[in-house]
Image: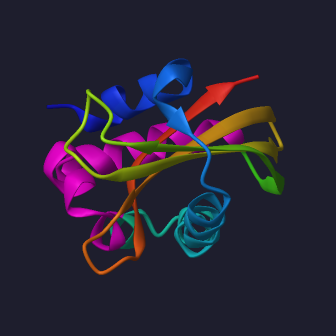
Amino acid sequence: MRCLVALAAATLLAACAESNPEAERAAFLATEPWLALMDAAEYERCWETAAPLFQESEGREDWLVKAHAYREPLGAFESRELNATTYLTNPWFAPAGEYAVVVYDSHWQAGIIYENVYMQRQPDGSWLVAGYAVQEQ
């Protein structure tokens, strides 16, 4: 199962979305250290610190290729602003559990993109990255 693709559908499935500001805030805060690793081109470390769901759907080598393809064309990082967060429980397209989609407007040398970070709550209550994708604005 390609959870990254499935989780991307979350932003299109408002019917699955719920309101949970506390969970959305926790998921948002958990994206920051992971994105700092991405910004530092620490792609292997990103894979290592991601949720097991991410690691199962994205093999390490596939992720490294994809991460370079996402970031290298963008040039230098300039800034990032939170655009939106969406909380989901038990979406039909992913394993049962709690998820949040955190979307950023990110400014780069080559232009502005949306960064979509898909977060999954872990059994210990922490939030880890379950998927990542970029999209041109």
Residue 123 lies, in percent from the top left, at 25, 73
Q: Is residue 53 above or below residue 116?
A: below
Query: What secondary structure is the stretch in magenta mostly built from?
Result: helix
Q: Is residue 129 left or right of residue 92?
A: right
**In x, y percent, where is residue 60?**
20, 56
Residue 71 in picture, x, y percent from top left: 57, 45
In terms of depth relative to the viewer, which is nearer, 25 or 116? 25
Figure label count: 0
Q: Is residue 128 above or below residue 137?
A: below
Q: Quadrant of the N terminus?
A: top left
Q: Residue at x 27, y 52 (%)?
A: 54
Q: Please determine whether, in this image, residue 5 is positioned above or below residue 66.
A: above
Quadrant that contains the C terminus = top right
Q: Is residue 70 left or right of residue 62?
A: right
136 lies left or right of 37: right
Foreground residue, 71 or 135?
135
